[in-house]
Image (spheres, grey):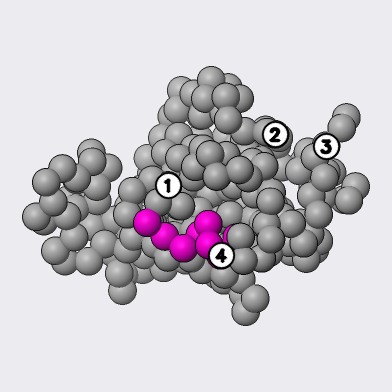
Amino acid sequence: MSYPVYSPERTALLLVDPYNDFLSDGGKLFPMLRSVADDVHLLDNLRTTVAAVRAQAIQVYYVPHRRWQPGDYDHWDHPNPTQRLIQQRHTFAKGSWGGEWHPDFVPQEDDIVVQEHWGQSGFANTDLDFQLKQRGITHVIVVGLLANTCIESTARFAMELGYHVTLVRDATAAFSKEMMHAAHDLNGPTFAHSIVDTHGLVQALQQQ
């Protein structure tokens, strides 16, 4: 099988929203995605993916959602449905355990944590594109949460900006199998240059 070339100097891993609220027992959203996460072995595959890119000296970028704070969205003209739910649930609340990184995915010294995104794209109204271009990045591997919202939106935006985009179908999760199917089988092929599983990604990285 032929894989894309992932030059360490030109490739970045975009790790989206690895918060306790998503990934840990006791997280506000974890019960909603637990079934899919368990089915795809999400945590194991995220650990494998992060370890594999670090072994190849590929830069890791943390792409975090806005940590909710009192007053967020209160006087907005049209917060989107997800933002309204965040407003109600206080998802990823700043200073809370749920808004902290999952203990297996705490940024290391050389990792880059970009500005928090308010919507679903890690690029919109953040410094992500600037940070990538300053390091000459041309290829992005997008993993994390959720497959059909922040992953899809961030990856689509990356394609529009001219990046080569790789999705890793079992290093993400969603609230249902139908959402996963839509993300990877219906929508993903219209914008992603490569859609692989974790095993395939590791093989590709080892062939560089």
Direction from residue 193 to residue 65 in the image, left or right: left
Question: Residues under labels 4 and 1: Cα distance?
Answer: 15 Å
Label drawn at residue 23: none
> Could you tell me which residue is drawn at 82 percent across and 45 percent down?
5
- What is the secondary structure assignment of the residue under circle 3? loop
Q: Which residues are magenta?
A: 125-132
Q: Is residue 127 magenta?
A: yes
Which residue corresponds to mark 2? 194
Which residue corresponds to mark 3? 3
Q: Answer yes or no: is residue 98 visible.
A: no
Question: Residues under labels 4 and 3: Cα distance?
Answer: 26 Å
Q: Residues within 10 Å of mark 1 (few under 14, many from 20)?
A: many
**Which of the image's four quarters has the N terminus?**
top right
The earlier-in-sequence mark between 3 and 1 is: 3
Amino acid type, callout 4? Gln
Q: Is the residue under label 1 in contact with that under label 3 (CB below 8 Å)? A: no
Q: Residues within 10 Å of mark 4 (few under 14, many from 20)?
A: some
Q: Is the residue under label 3 in contact with that under label 4 (CB below 8 Å)? A: no
Q: Give the answer, above or below, for where 167 lies relative to 88.
A: above
Q: Is the residue under label 2 in contact with that under label 3 (CB below 8 Å)? A: yes
Q: Nearer the viewer, mark 4 or mark 3?
A: 4
Q: Position of residue 143 (x, y in %)?
A: 58, 47
Which of the 4 image quadrants contains residue 105? bottom right
Amino acid type, callout 1? Ser
Which residue corresponds to mark 4? 131
> Could you tell me which residue is drawn at 55 percent across and 45 percent down?
161
